[in-house]
Amino acid sequence: MNADGQQAANRVIRCAWLLRPGQPPLPNRRLTIEAGLLTDISVVPADERHLIAPVAVIPALVNAHTHLEFSRLERPLEPSAPFPDWIRAVIGYRRQHPTETDICTAVASGVQQSDRSGVRLIGEICASDSAAVELQRAIGETGGRAVCFREFIGFRSEDIPQRVAELDALVASHVAHPVRMALSPHAPYSVHPRLFEAVVSRARAQGGPIAMHLAETRDELELLQHRSGRFREFLDGLGLWDRAALGEYRSILPYLEALATCHRALAVHANYLTDDEIQFLADHPHVAVVYCPRTHRWFGHDAHPAEKLRQAGATVVLGTDSRASNPDLSIWRELQLATRLSADALWQRLPEVTTTAAAALGYDPADFDLQTGRPAAMLQVSCSCNTEAAVGEFLVSDKCQVMV
Ligand SMILES: [Zn+2]
């Protein structure tokens, strides 16, 4: 049974459990779908109980952060540490697969992999026009949606006028439904502050979300604080280091302050935050932290501040990041790991891959909430448990899979 909800046919689903974001699971629910809309949710009547499928129905999923150009990798790139060496491996991979055809093939594959794992909205970091066009084509075929964050990199002062000219040319262009265009300055160690500020001002004018990798490693913090360390050596080695390049930027906070001037923003990773930065994010919930649990674990970072952020009232959503640091593109697996690392049940974390994640990308959270009168964008996961406690345990186990 295809429970995606994109089809117009009328149908009824009788499920053992219904899982709505942030709410305890409801047993034995009957869902009526008419012309693609979820029109009724009720308790399965006694004479239909034998028709109940051993599944939990969940909303369609959102992956707030990925780079689909790496989707043909069979395993993550190595070494995972030190981080600048992993960046060198990424640069090496790009040199081995330099053509637009290589990139587009990987993007198309990544869209299909995402679709097969139940992702219906993707926050994709996109490095070229052709990748953006391919994203639009491939997403159109699956019936999903995506935000295409066009990525900007440029650290040397003399390159900035050219990068800003490219930025302005891009702002004048567009991609169309089902893809929305947005902007992404890559990271503090790869983006000159003048380019960063230019991207922020264009994103603010556009009104869309902006995404930036921030506070990913201690090396990044050392570069900002002391202008030294592995990233300094990395930039020196590429002939890109410029003593004046980072200007007044001495920590993550000024980046967060600039991002917060946009309508909405994603601070990707945010693995190493000070208490002041956590408080700033709590005071600015339109700046969402994108936590990528399996990527975080693969790099061997210190514990992520996700729990502290949630408790402070900051917005946390989940992403897979790319297959250069993750074995696959399953956001469900990210949700399972994030749940196992928190004190909460999976349904309490579910908004981070549905409603909250959709809102962070600028979409209507109600489309990912299984409300009556809304599109029936839903999935099923295997689940034959009899009690809420057993459901909670089963949902985070490896045996629990998204059925698409
Ligand atoms: Zn990333």
Image: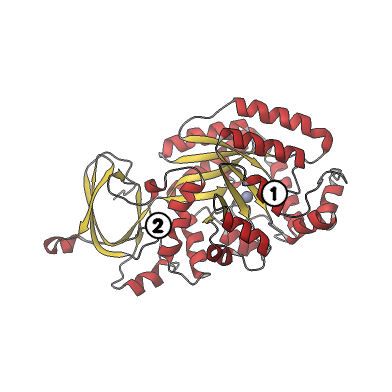
In this view, the residue in front, 259 or 5, is 259
Q: Is residue 273 visible?
A: no
Q: Residue at x 44, y 56 (%)?
A: 351
Q: Whole-percent x and y of residue 26? A: 29, 64
Measured Cα–Cα span from mark 1 to mark 2:
37 Å
* Left or right, residue 366 beside residue 372: right
In this view, the residue in front, 274 or 18, is 274
Q: Whole-percent x and y of residue 294? A: 57, 61
- SS at circle 1: helix
Provide the residue designation for mark 2. 402
- SS at circle 2: strand
Q: Quadrant of residue 80?
A: bottom right
Q: Quadrant of residue 364?
A: top left
Q: Whole-percent x and y of residue 349? A: 46, 62
Provide the residue designation for mark 1. 255
Q: What amino acid type is highlighted by mark number 2?
A: Val
Q: Is residue 299 above or below residue 234?
A: below
Q: Whole-percent x and y of residue 228? A: 85, 56
The outermost residue toward the left is: 47
Q: Quadrant of residue 276?
A: bottom right
